[in-house]
Image: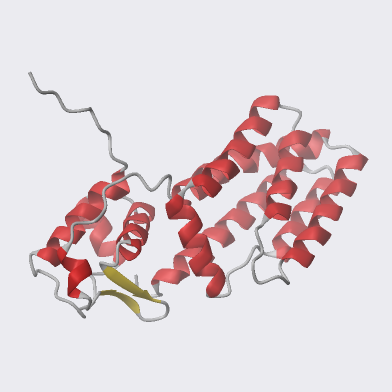
Amino acid sequence: MELQAVKTDRLYIKVAEQLSKLVKDGAIKPGERFPAERDLAERLGVSRPTIREAMIALELSGVIEIRTGSGIYVSKKKAKVETQIDSGDKGVGPFEILEIRYILEAEACALAAARITDEQIAQLKEALKEMEEEEKQEDASEKADWKFHSIIAEASQNSAIHSIVNWLWKLRNQSELSTAFLERIRKEGVHPSINDHVRIIEALEKRNPEKARMAMKMHIENATAAAAAYFGKES
């Protein structure tokens, strides 16, 4: 009896394979523009973040070209189009990670506002300085950004939150999909917002949980919007 290993693909892989088949079958020809992100999400019954992550996978496979400010087009390189998308797991997508960070880190920040120490406030300001210096480098690694968010998670005084926040950053850095996308948007001039981080520190200094929660939510919303802009305004 021959058995095959049970495999659970990530949703974006299943979407990418469907879209790749449309290209392979000639429904969308080389050089033609892809349907709008909103339309694809409705027709496939998935979220727009899932469509974006499928597009990143297709771009990595050479099936499409994402032209910032213009849209998404089928690659004219037929050799790439003819090959089926690599369905191997490229890791968790950047937009899924941003969604869970929005939920978790906003509440962690609210807890931290009530529990943070003066020493941790000072550590955040130092991390912010490191972030400013790091952003001047072409190969900025965002280590200071990770440090900043880890300090806040630690300040929540909940070891589970601290562990999960750090795990999410590791997950992002281990994901081929996320790291490749981060590299692309950096080249487009998208960087962590210093001003957003300043507002977070100000809310924490005031020991105001609600302002801290909103400051973190706004920061991650802004990061998500900046990343989504890579796919074009008309998506």
In x, y percent, where is residue 87?
26, 48
Q: Residue at x 75, y 60 (%)?
A: 131
Does the rendering let one see residue 225?
no
Query: How was this image coloured?
Result: secondary structure
Q: Quadrant of residue 56?
A: bottom left
Q: Does the image show residue 200?
A: yes
Quarter of the image for the N terminus: give it. top left
Give the number of marks. Answer: 0
Please report the residue visible at 24 percent of the width from the left and 47 percent of the height from the top. 14
Please, which residue is most extreme toward the right here? 118
Reply above or below: 203 against 73. Answer: above
The x and y percentages for residue 70 are: 36, 81
Residue for point 62% across, 67% down: 191
Q: Is residue 189 above or below residue 224?
A: below
Asked whether 102 or 190 is in front, the reply is 190
Seen from the viewer's position, the closer of residues 62 and 22 is: 62
User: Where does residue 76 sit, x and y in percent of width and height?
Assistant: 22, 78
Horizontal side of residue 176 vs 58, given as left or right: right
- Residue at the image position 76 percent from the left and 28 percent from the top: 157
Q: Quadrant of the C terminus?
A: bottom left
